[in-house]
Image: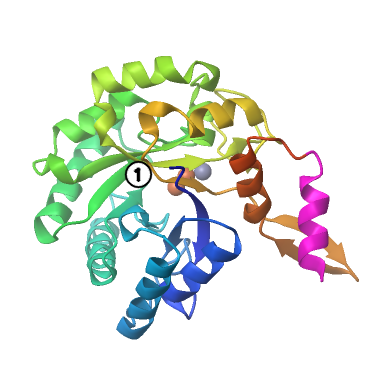
Amino acid sequence: MLTIGCHVNFGQNQLKGCVEQALSYGANTFMFYTGAPQNTRRSSIDDFLSIEALTQMKENGIGLEHIVCHAPYIVNLANNKDLEKYQFSINFLIKEIERCNLMGIQYIVLHPGSAVGLEPQEAIKNIIYALNIVLDTTDSVTICLETMAGKGTELGQNTEELKTIIEGIVKKERIGICLDTCHLNDAGVDLDAFDEYLDEFDQKIGIDRVKVLHINDSKNPRASHKDRHECIGYGTIGFDTLIKVIYNERLEHIPKILETPYIGETDEAKERLYPPYKFEIEMIKKKMFNANLMDDIRSYYKK
Ligand code: FE
Ligand code: FE
Ligand code: ZN
């Protein structure tokens, strides 16, 4: 069965709010940040909201085992020049995993980190050191390292780098991989030859490590190292290629998460933004491109 969802906002209603958004999009899974992705201000987990969310999930066939959390961007385990910041990143990730455990969430997606002024080998050592501490201090949750576009000094933009990181981890059973189609494209992978990429991935890392797929089109050509997401079928990867990735048999049981951009509209001089997910999920389920996607989204949410 297709497990498809999207990024939702944790907000005040926490997991309960996430479930409601997911259902409104026709999704059967979702991914959230426990607060704003760009900062580390977090409220404590409300057990009552979690319990209500779990009931709603059960009623609607959303499996808790497919739900994904994403660590905030500012967690950078690669650079230790500022020891205080490095330590903060480690501590924050530990707390984030504890929050996941309180809600029964199994997967947390993490950007491996940016070297910013360090040699890549040095940066990778830092990532390994930090991850080993985090895994030693926490339980259960699998950390899914995301494949990156290679913007700036990002690590994890090829299977070789990810492989090196995993080799240094003691508790390897709690390390997974999140493949992001926009990032793969921007890092230079030809998604039209996705099966060949998976063959190589399987050889180097093992396909069983893939726990999450991020499904995005890209605003930029292959190997641009830009990382700007586009709506499904409206970017350089294209609808048919993304459909083939989504329905690839080797990744059938893996949750697929959309992180495509909201659609803008200036109405009475006010800028409005609408989520594209309901209509993208519809296209994906039907395997049929909607050339009126933007208009459909605007007219649906305008009411
Ligand atoms: Fe990400
Ligand atoms: Fe992503
Ligand atoms: Zn991205």
Q: Quadrant of the C terminus?
A: bottom right
Residue 88 drawn above or below residue 14: above
Front-lying residue, 218 or 198: 198
Residue displayed at 66% across by 35% down: 219
Query: Which residue is disc 1 drawn over?
Result: 113
Residue displayed at 78% across by 62% down: 300
Q: Quadrant of residue 240?
A: top right
Give the x, y percent position of residue 247: 49, 32
Q: Which residues are magenta?
A: 291-303
Query: Can residue 238 be seen in the rendering of this structure?
Result: no
Overall secondary structure of the magenta section: helix
Give the x, y percent position of residue 102: 24, 72
Residue displayed at 57% across by 57% down: 26
Q: Quadrant of the N terminus?
A: top left
Front-lying residue, 27 or 167: 27
**Badge 1 local density, few (<14 within 10 Å), some, or many (20+)?**
many
Residue 236 drawn above or below residue 144: above
How many numbered badges does the structure rendering display? 1
Secondary structure under the numbered disc 1 in the rendered image? loop
In-image side of 250 versus 5 (left or right): left
Query: Can residue 36 be seen in the rendering of this structure?
Result: yes
